[in-house]
Amino acid sequence: MDNIAEVFTGEGTREFCQFLSISSGSIGEVRSQSYRTFDNRYISEETLNELQELTDSLSRKIFNLMNYLKKSDFKGLKYSL
């Protein structure tokens, strides 16, 4: 969420997609860390599965938003001022 929040300064679509991409990488880090916490027995397999479902869902949403923005004619506020 913090990666995406950085773009609320009136940047254009291209910059927004860049921050979405960074956010997607952060989701990958959460997935990796959730496996590590499971392997070290800090969380249950049920919690691991829940985290994997949530990160998968969020990754798909970010991917779909990026695709939508790339196809959109709207280029962001930066270019319309």
Image (cartoon, rainbow, N blue to C red):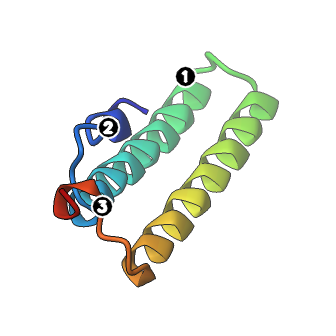
Residue type for callout 2 = Asn
Disc 2 versus disc 1: distance between alpha carbons? Answer: 28 Å
In the image, what residue occupies the spot 30% across and 38% down?
Answer: 8
Side of 3 relative to 9 (left or right):
right
Q: Which mark is residue 3?
A: 2
On screen, 1 above or below 61?
A: above
**Secondary structure under the numbered disc 3 in the rendered image:** loop
In the image, what residue occupies the spot 29% across and 69% down?
Answer: 75
Disc 1 versus disc 3: distance between alpha carbons? Answer: 44 Å
Disc 2 versus disc 3: distance between alpha carbons? Answer: 17 Å
Question: Residue most toward the top?
Answer: 42
N-term mark: 2 or 1: 2
Q: Which mark is residue 76?
A: 3
Q: Which residue is mark 1?
A: 40
Q: Marks 2 and 3: which is nearer the front? A: 3
In the image, what residue occupies the spot 72% across and 48% down?
Answer: 53
**Image position, residue 77 (x, y; %):** 27, 55
N-term mark: 2 or 3: 2
Q: Are marks 2 and 3 in contact (CB under 8 Å)?
A: no
N-term mark: 1 or 3: 1
**Image position, residue 46 (x, y; %):** 81, 32
Locate residue 26: give its quadrant.
top left
Residue type for callout 1 = Asn
Locate residue 76: give its quadrant.
bottom left
Query: Quick one: label 3, few (<14), some, or many (20+) residues within 10 Å?
Result: some
The N terminus lies in quadrant: top left
The C terminus lies in quadrant: bottom left
